[in-house]
Amino acid sequence: MTGSGGTGPDHTDHASGAGVHEAEEWTRLQEGRDPESFSRAWLDRQASIIGTDVIRAVVVLGAPETGPFAPVAVWPEGTLGSPWLVTGVENAISRKQTVMERGKRSPTTDDQKRKLDVVSHPLMVDAQVCGAVS
């Protein structure tokens, strides 16, 4: 895609710290040669785009249609998933469509009253489910 004002490494403000971070994310994404490194870079990029509303994310991959499907990347790196992400991934894979669960209680200890929305989407190749992101 061409045009001015787009996103990506060619449209980064390298004078700011955020611009440098964004350029590093794009570089990692472009250099991701295996599913794990690409998925980690992609989750980092998505979390940066969405912003502070993202608490956790996961990408699961497996054999098309049959699985088993297993996590290949989590965000932030080194954290555990959550029951809400597991449910979201399972529903997106089984339904082969985007699933949104609204108003779930926060699994974090910092704000027990916080409610979360979980968005999960199947990853499809040639109309076959190969995984999901949540």
Image (cartoon, grey):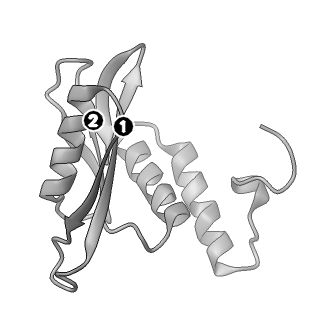
Res 98 label: 1
Quarter that holds the N terminus: top right
x then y, percent, for residue 95: 25, 27
In the foreground, 39 or 31: 39
Q: Do the residues labelled 1 and 2 touch (CB within 8 Å)?
A: yes
x then y, percent, for residue 26: 59, 54
Res 119 label: none
Say if 49 sits above or below 18 in the image: above
Judge whether residue 61 can be spotted in this image: no
Inter-mark Cα distance, 1 to 2: 6 Å
Which residue appears at 39% of the width and 15% of the height?
127
**Which residue in the rendered view is the most extreme toward the right?**
4
Residue designated by label 2: 92
In the foreground, 114 or 17: 114
x then y, percent, for residue 85: 21, 52
* Quarter of the rendering containing residue 59: top left
**Neighbour tally class for label 2: few under 14, some 14-19, many 20 plus, Cα within 10 Å:** many
**Which residue in the rendered view is the most extreme toward the front?**
103
> What's under tag 2, amino acid-wise?
Ala
**Which residue in the rendered view is the most extreme toward the top?**
126
In the foreground, 12 or 110: 110
Say if 122 sits above or below 134 in the image: above
- From the viewer's perspective, tell me whether residue 71 is left or right of residue 45: left
Which residue appears at 58% of the width and 70% of the height?
21
The local secondary structure at tag 1 comes to: loop
- From the viewer's perspective, tell me whether residue 43 is left or right of residue 133: right
